[in-house]
Amino acid sequence: MANSFTDDQVQRQFAAYSKKMSSPQRVQSKVLDEESRIFGLFSRVNRLKPFLEDAQTIFALLKDFLSGRYKDVPWRVIAALAGVLLYVLTPIDLIPDVLIPFGWLDDAAVFTLALKLCGGDIEAYRRWKRP
């Protein structure tokens, strides 16, 4: 079961959820309004716990971008990061989240891919955010 999805499937899911983030309003209504729910998942699901700090950074980046405080990031990165958070929130995906303990494997894989693809932009934001 742990190998029931491929890297290609993970990348397609990542791209599909990124495309759903077509506007700042969509990011706000679909992702930022669910911040506490998403942090709850990252705090309580063992496979996602290692990513809690990254998720917090991504939320801060999204908020700073949408407020206009930070603009040094392409929209596609914003859409991708918002999309991956939406993917984690959605219980039906490559491996349904109710299939314990395997249900969160794909969420962790998609989140890892997002960090890999957008890592440079996330690190640039962290440097900007530091005093």
Image (cartoon, rainbow, N blue to C red):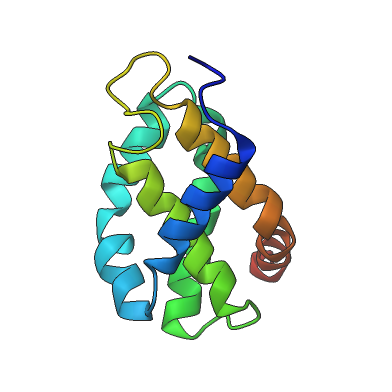
Residue 93: percent from left, percent from top: 35, 38
Q: Nearer the viewer, residue 11 or 74?
A: 11
- For the image, the number of numbered tags is 0
Residue 78 visible? The answer is: yes
Q: Nearer the viewer, residue 114 or 38?
A: 114
Q: Nearer the viewer, residue 30 or 16?
A: 16
Q: Is residue 24 above or below residue 57?
A: below
Which residue lies at the image location 68% right of the left edge and 64% below the top edge?
130
Choose top left, top right, bottom left or bottom right for residue 112. top right
Q: Is residue 105 above or below residue 90?
A: above
Which residue lies at the image location 34% right of the left edge and 14% below the top edge?
100
Q: Is residue 96 above or below residue 56?
A: above
Residue 73: percent from left, percent from top: 63, 76
Residue 3: percent from left, percent from top: 57, 20
Which residue lies at the image location 59% right of the left edge and 83% below the top edge?
71
Q: Is residue 31 above or below residue 94?
A: below
Position of the C terminus, as image quadrant, is bottom right
Which residue lies at the image location 61% right of the left edge and 78% below the top edge?
74
Residue 111 visible? The answer is: no
Residue 1: percent from left, percent from top: 48, 14
